[in-house]
Image (cartoon, grey):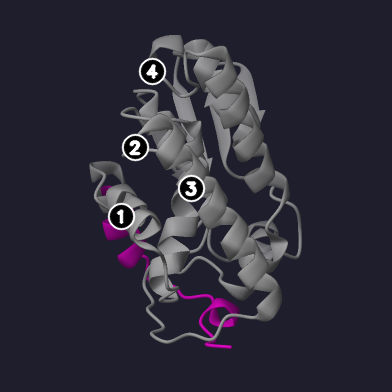
Amino acid sequence: MAVTLTLSSKNYSSWSLRGWLMARFAGLSFKEEMVEQDDAGARAELLLLAPSVRVPRLTHGDISVWDTLAIGEYLNELKPDAGLLPADAAARAHCRSICGEMHSGFSALRSALPMNLKAHFPKFTVWSRANGDIERVTEIWRDCLTRYGGPYLFGARRSMADAMYAPVATRFITYDVPLDEACAAYCQTIMAMPEMGEWVVAAKLEPDDIEELEVEF
């Protein structure tokens, strides 16, 4: 069956990146369909003015799956050997928990550090509320890397969790967020993935900027 993944901006859309990485981790062959930059709904999502309900969206024959967690679960059913969820039941529950935490939380981090792969803001001042989110993310990373041995959050294989937290790694680099050695190494591991390299190249080729997300506030 034909597979299409509908995406928004590669420079700004963290949810598009998450869904795309999951599909690539699963080894799925798919066609990309980009939403136009001037689409009002897509713009509202990127500016956090509307929930992310339109993108990413996976269309597999007559099946349509939206919401990034739903896409991840569907891909795990479709490609169970790809390792999107760990084989061990306890690790699998842990993976689902931290993915759910990213999916529903960290609103201060999202607002203060919008994804922007073209930009770099050295010595950026992070809002105090966002610092709490950063501390929680790095706590999750350190725990997983210690518990499962790295280099990815659940060991040697990339999982749904790495796709969910990859946009945060890009934010930490864009906004020059100070990190401990383990978390900095994890960011570099994520950015060194060939899939991330491919995505970043495409992001930097996008012609249009969204002015509201280019402000160094």
Q: Amino acid at mark 3?
A: Trp
Left or right: residue 11 versus residue 89 is left
Residue under pointer 1? 185
Residue range in magenta is: 198-217
Q: Please, is residue 104 above or below residue 111 in the view?
A: above
Q: Residues within 10 Å of mark 1 (few under 14, many from 20)?
A: few
Real-space CA distance between mark 3 and mark 1, rounded to the nearest whole angstrom: 11 Å
Front tag of 1 and 4 = 1
Mark nearer the N terminus (4 vs 3): 4
Instruction: Tell me the SS state at disc 3.
Output: helix
Mark nearer the N terminus (3 vs 1): 3
Residue under pointer 3? 141
- Where on the picture, by quarter, is residue 107? bottom right
The C terminus - image quarter: bottom right
Instruction: Tell me the SS state at disc 2.
Output: loop
Q: Which mark is residue 82?
A: 4
Real-space CA distance between mark 4 and mark 3, rounded to the nearest whole angstrom: 22 Å
Real-space CA distance between mark 1 and mark 2, rounded to the nearest whole angstrom: 10 Å
Q: Residue at 56% across / 69% down in the picture?
A: 114
User: Could you say which is closer to the camera, residue 162 or residue 60?
Assistant: 162
Measuring from the top left, give residue 44's x and y in whole percent: 70, 64
Q: Amino acid at mark 1?
A: Ala
